[in-house]
Amino acid sequence: MRPIFPFTAIAGQEEMKLALLLAAIDPAIGGVLVFGDRGTGKSTAVRALARLLPPMRVVVGCRYHCDPGANGALCEECQTRSRAADLASEIVPVPVVDLPLGATEDRVVGALDLEVALTSGEKRFETGLLARAHRGFLYIDEVNLLEDHLVDLLLDVAASGENVVEREGLSIRHPARFVLVGSGNPEEGELRPQLLDRFGLSVEVRTPDDVATRVDIVRRRDAFERDAAKFQGDWQAEQDELRHRIVAARSGLNDVELREPALEKAASLCIAIGSDGLRGELTLIRAARALAALDGDPSVSAAHIRTVAPAALRHRLRRSPLEEGGSTVRIERALNEMFDA
C-alpha cells in the first residue's frame, strides 16, 4: 500500500482539515469545496483523511460497497442475494475516487461491458466512478473547469443519492452516496452556481505567510519523504486518537441536542448577511452539530456556530461589486457584531 502523509501531521490548514472532518462525521452536510493556491495540501488532505477513517464493512462481492446492515439501502443484486441467504461481509478501506476533468460520461456513470458483450453476448454493466465512490469520497481537482454535462450529472446524483443508467438496453439503478470534495484555483474560472450551492462547506486555503509555519511544513514533508514508515509511526498516536474521536462523534451525533437559542443564532446570522434560501441555515446547523459531537459536547452552542459559519455560508452570499474583502469579511463582521453584543 502506497504510504500516505498522516492527516494529523498536516500543518497550517486548520479550516480545511476541520471541514473535511465534519463532512466525514456527517455526510449529510454535503461535501467540501476547497479553493486556493496550488501546493497547499488540498489533495494530500483528502487522501490522508480517507486513510485515517475507520474501515467500513461491505457485502462480499458487491460492486457498490453496500453496507450489510443497511437493508433499505442495498443495491438490487444484494437485495436478491439477501432473500436467499445471509450476506457475507468484509472490512475494506474507505474509497477515494478521482474524477478527472477529461472523463467521459460512460466512465463516470458506467456502461455496457463491451468485452463481455462481444465474447459471450451477455449484457453486463461495467461500473463507473460513481459506483466506486459509494460510501467514500469523490474528489475532483480543478472542479471549476469541469464540463457542463458532467456538472449536470453530478447535480442529479447528489440530489437523489442514486445513479440511474438507461442506455444500450441496460436499466441499472444503484446507490451513489459519497462525500463530494472539489478543489481549484479561483483565478482559473468560476464554479457554476448550481454546483457551488451543492457543496455544504467551502474553505479558502492560502500559502502560509509566516516563517515558522512554512519551516514546520517543509520539515515534516522532508521527514516523510526520507522515511515514510518512521514518520507515520511518529504520528500514529495522534492518528489513533483522532480516529477514536471520529468514531465517537459518529455514534453520538444524533444525541447532540439542538436548543432554541442556537437555532435563533443561526437564523439571525443568515438574515444579517442576506443568505439566499434555507440551505445555508440547514448546513450551518448540521456542521455545528457535527463539531459538537467531535468535541464531545452534549449540545450545540454559539461557539460551535461561530466556528463553522464562514465555511457554511461564504459561498452562499450574493456578491456586491462595491464590497471590499468579499463574503468572508462580511460574515466575520456579522459574527463580531452578533456575538460581541
Image (cartoon, grey):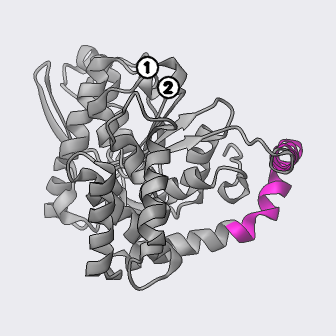
Q: In which quarter of the image is residue 169?
A: top left
Q: In this view, does 86 lie above or below 248?
A: above
Disc 1 crowd rating (10 Å Cα; few below 14, some 14-19, many 20+) is some
Q: Which of 274 and 199 is in front in this view?
A: 274
x and y, in percent, of residue 201 in the image: 41, 49
Instruction: Please indicate whether residue 333 sits to the left or right of residue 68 in the image.
Output: right
Q: Start and end of the magenta stretch?
A: 215-238
Magenta highlight on residue 173: no
Residue corresponding to mark 2: 142
Disc 2 crowd rating (10 Å Cα; few below 14, some 14-19, many 20+) is some
Magenta highlight on residue 221: yes
Q: Which of 106 and 168 is in front in this view?
A: 106
Q: Residue at x 33, y 41 (%)?
A: 317
Instruction: Please indicate whether residue 72 sits to the left or right of residue 339 in the image.
Output: left
Q: Which residue is drawn at 89% across and 43% down?
A: 226
Q: Residue at x 28, y 68 (%)?
A: 69
Q: Is residue 333 above or below residue 258?
A: above
Q: Nearer the viewer, residue 171 or 236?
A: 236
Residue corresponding to mark 1: 145
Q: Which of 143 and 272 is in front in this view?
A: 272
Q: In this view, does 12 lie above or below 43?
A: below
Type of residue at label 1?
Answer: Leu
Image quarter hosting the C terminus? bottom left
Q: In which quarter of the image is residue 198?
A: top left
Q: Is residue 125 visible?
A: no
Please tell me whether mark 2 sits on a helix, a strand or a loop. Answer: loop
Residues under numbered marks 2 and 1 in contact, where contact means CB atoms less than 8 Å apart: yes
The answer for how far apart the CA atoms under marks 2 and 1 are is 6 Å
x and y, in percent, of residue 13 in the image: 65, 50
